[in-house]
Image: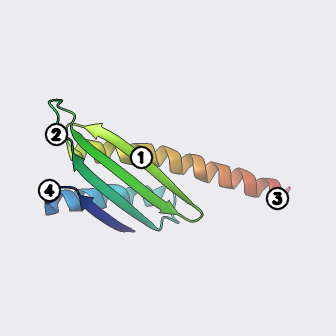
Amino acid sequence: MKVNVQSVNFNVDQKLVVFIQEKLDKLEQFYDKIIFADVFLKVQHTSEKENKITEVLLSIPGDELMVKKNTKTFEEGIDECERALQRQLIKKKEKINAHSNKKIA
């Protein structure tokens, strides 16, 4: 899957890009028709510790899934986004399978 990583007002480390790619590649186990993922990394300038914003837009045929998380680190944000997208993809696949089973019956 193609993963585009965009960071706002800072340069993203290559290790983080590799981490993001590996995490999001795992999503293909749950839904094999993923087209691409856009990842947006932002740092909010606040006094709060959870100032890292991670957004993931996942493009699948006929739909897009979006997840946004505020965390202390981008790695933590990617972990949370990956889990949320995993749940959404499983629901999507179950819905498609239930719909296709109705057509057969």
- At mark 2, the secondary structure is loop
Frontmost of labels 4 and 2 is: 2
Q: Residue tagged by mark 2?
A: 45
Above/below status of 70 relative to 59: above
Q: Is residue 78 left or right of residue 83?
A: left
Where does residue 21 sit, x and y in percent of width and height?
29, 61
Q: Which residue is drawn at 59% across and 51% down?
A: 92
Instruction: Report the amino acid beneath label 4.
Output: Phe
Q: Is residue 71 left or right of residue 9?
A: right
Q: Residue tagged by mark 4?
A: 10
Q: How far apart are marks 3 and 4 (CA)?
A: 50 Å
Mark closest to the chain's N terminus, 2 or 1: 2
88, 94: nearer the viewer? 88
Q: Going by the picture, which residue comes out furthest to the top? A: 48
Frontmost of labels 4 and 1 is: 4
51, 102: nearer the viewer? 51
Contact (Cβ within 8 Å) of mark 4 with mark 2: no
Mark closest to the chain's N terminus, 3 or 4: 4
Q: How far apart are marks 2 and 1 (CA)?
A: 21 Å
Where does residue 27 sit, x and y in percent of width and height?
43, 56
Instruction: Report the amino acid beneath label 3.
Output: Lys
Could you tell me how many numbered marks the image carries? Answer: 4
Q: Distance between the residues labelled 2 and 3?
A: 52 Å
